[in-house]
Amino acid sequence: MKRIDVKVGFQCSNLCRFCVQGDKRYKHPDKSTKEIKEILKKSKKDAEGVVFTGGEPTFRPKELLKWVTYAKGLGYKTIQIQTNGRMFSYLGYCKDLIKAGVNEFGPALHGSTPEIHDYLTRAPGSWEQTTKGIRNLRSLGQYILTNSVINKKNYKDLPNLAKLFVSLGVSQFQFAFMHINHIIANDPNLIKGIVPRHSKVEPYVKKGLNVGINAGVKVMTEAIPYCFMEGYEEYIAEKVIPESDVFDAGFEVKDYSKYRKNQGKAKGPNCPKCKYYKICEGPWREYPQIFGWDEFKPVKK
């Protein structure tokens, strides 16, 4: 099923240290309701799903309800909110979103404790609000798919984070290796402080996945190449990510999967020797530009 991702703006109530959107919040205006409705209308002939993302779509809570209502009226089958999840701590707002037509909720949680999550989001109290939001959605019987960005501060916590997700009753959780933005890439201190090495992350990702697998929860990873996923190849999200068009800051990315493979990610000199060469996308290209290719060992054919 093809979908569209609509970045409605880049304002956010969090200020995440790893945010791939970098400083867009200071450079680009929010999309107007008129613009968003035009995108939804023109895209409906090709797409059956829509993701409202940003930035933080709930930063404009009343407008978001209007966009969702309009999307539902156009006939979109899947309407998802990608969010920091803090507004879901208000049960009434959750009910309003469901009534408007949201049927997938994608809150982001990056640590099993407030100390980890709130440090990363630079928003005191955000862990408490997001976990409360997940509980609210669970009480309302909603489909909850969480996303956690893997970074140097939280990678050892992933197994505990997975246990938290199971206890909260999420429908699905995903661990996504951080995409290094241009601000981090140009600052050695930020690289040292926030970017982990794939080889260090691997065992903790697998332990976290095992927690979900053993509990019968759907689990996925994103932006982790096959050479770090031996035995867990079926949990690589890139195999199942739907075809998407992304409406970003004043431009549209047609077929984001193609963009991701050809421009977003990269393959190294030894990758053609790997049996997964044709289906693996490789790491985000900024990573080997900083750390090189020594970690990436081809899987024997």
Image: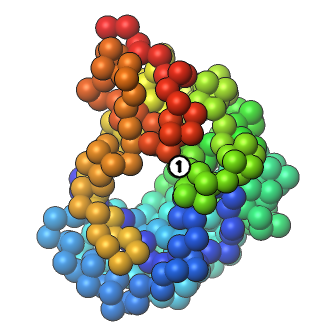
Question: Label 1, on which residue?
Answer: 179
* Residue type, label 1: His
On screen, residue 107 versus residue 161, left or right, reads left
* Residue at the (63%, 32%) spot, across then down: 197
* Residue at the (38%, 70%) spot, across then down: 248
On the rendered image, what quadrant is the C terminus found in?
Answer: top left
SS at mark 1?
A: loop
Q: Is residue 41 above or below residue 175?
A: below
Residue 54, image x, y percentages = 49, 70
Is residue 207 shown to the viewer in this render?
no
On screen, residue 230 versus residue 93, left or right, reads left
Q: Residues within 10 Å of mark 1 (few under 14, many from 20)?
A: many
Residue 169, image x, y percentages = 63, 46
- Along the viewing direction, whichever of 132 and 24 lies nearer the viewer: 24
* Residue at the (70%, 32%) spot, across then down: 159
Tag count: 1
Q: Is residue 81 above or below residue 268?
A: below
Q: Quadrant of residue 205?
A: top right
- Along the viewing direction, whichever of 222 and 171 lies nearer the viewer: 222
Q: Quadrant of residue 129?
A: bottom right
- Along the viewing direction, whichever of 253 and 172 lies nearer the viewer: 253
On screen, residue 207 versus residue 252, left or right, reads right
